[in-house]
Amino acid sequence: MTILVTGGAGFIGSNFVFLLLEEHPDWRVVCVDALTYAANIHTLNEAFRSPNFVFYKEDIRNREGVCSIFEKERPDVVVNFAAESHVDRSIENPAVFLETNIIGTAVLMDACRKYGIKRFHQVGTDEVYGDLPLDRPDLFFYEDTPIHTSSPYSTSKASADLLALAYYRTYGLPVTISRCSNNYGPYQFPEKLIPLMINNALQDKALPVYGKGLNVRDWLYVKDHCLGILAVLDKGGVGEVYNLGGHNEKANIEIVKIILKELGKPESLITFVTDRKGHDQRYAIDPSKAMKELGWAPTTAFADGIKLTIQWYKDHLDWMRECTSGDYAKYYEEMYGNR
Ligand code: NAD
Ligand code: TYD
């Protein structure tokens, strides 16, 4: 069995690579990643020690490059994590989101059609459903909730999902899609809420909370997401969509306060800044289909997962320094300087 994982040098993709090497030591894992700003090749240090792991620095938009990897490796299964993934960056520069998230996905699926595969799995997001109002805690996202996107990021991800379903219907490509809520855990790039706040708090820097901090996200520990994808590969039906989430909704301000408390830092570090444009109010997944049909359920409670995550960042300050060297200071100044 050869599994090709795109975006494996990023946050969730790398955690998925580690899980594969642990759970399926007999599988060959082929990782394809363009190594954008969001990747850190050192994240994969441990994987490089495995004889079953091979890495290609390649852009999924490059048809020729992708096809030559397929020609050589002949994957049985492809799992597509590669994406531009940050909403704030998509607001500043949508074009690359359309190119990687839509065109890149099409290139991969064309290669799957050309060389033949058993499964193409598209890693999707609950953001394709848009948002829910804060005053309706009874509402959730189901797999048949209409697509209703807000940001260029979520729109590009929704387009990729629709394209995947079109390749299933039109060409019979054996596609599955998972749509997950917000992930947290080791190796997340410090532009996203949780690692950014941990990084700033560790340096006694201001914690920039958008608006009033009341927007709600539904948090899932990254390993549980990866186990969910394995369950879809194992038991999921082709042409099907599965929502992955753990009913763990929290307002952003709650998350920030938990981080400060855990690190023993004062709440005076919290700074309310100008809100994100088009800011989605609330995300909340109903994961019943995945639970019933795949027997999947999250195993890490938020109270434990956030402790593990904070400890991981404290233990990996060098990794964080690598991520925040180079262009990060410029990004931070542009995004937060005059906010
Ligand atoms: P990430 O930004 O940490 O990693 C993305 C990886 O993709 C990086 O290693 C980057 O180098 C690579 N990449 C980007 N453009 C590429 C290209 N053109 N060709 C090849 N590689 C490229 O993202 P993440 O948080 O790990 O997200 C992974 C996937 O999961 C994405 O598709 C995202 O939409 C989805 N997702 C993320 C979350 C979340 O909370 N982080 C939740 C639901 C779904
Ligand atoms: P983020 O981690 O970017 O994920 P997403 O927007 O895809 O859900 O943001 C999570 C929430 O945290 C979102 O409501 C925006 C908010 N946020 C802040 O308040 N301050 C920040 O500096 C960042 C990065 C996010």
Image (cartoon, grey):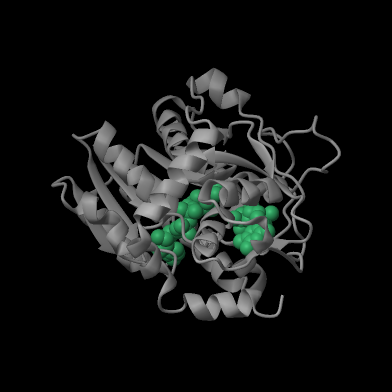
Query: Who is closer to the viewer here, 286 or 318?
Result: 318
Q: Position of residue 75 (x, y in %)?
A: 28, 45
- Residue 86: % across, % down: 57, 62
Give whichever of 334, 130 is nearer the camera.
334
- On the rendered structure, is 26 left or right of 292? left
Q: Residue at x 64, y 74 (%)?
A: 336
Q: Is residue 338 above or below residue 104?
A: below
Q: Position of residue 80 (x, y in %)?
A: 43, 50
Q: Quadrant of residue 243?
A: top right
Most extreme residue toward the right is 135
Q: What residue is rendered at 56% in x and 18% in y?
A: 292
Would you place residue 221 above or below residue 91 in this image? Answer: above
Q: Residue at x 48, y 41 (%)?
A: 307
Is 112 left, or right, of 206 in this rendering?
left
Residue 241: % across, % down: 57, 35
Q: Is residue 33 left or right of residue 240?
A: left
How many numbered markers are drawn? 0
| Viewer can see residue 112 | no
The quadrant of the image that shows the N terminus is top left
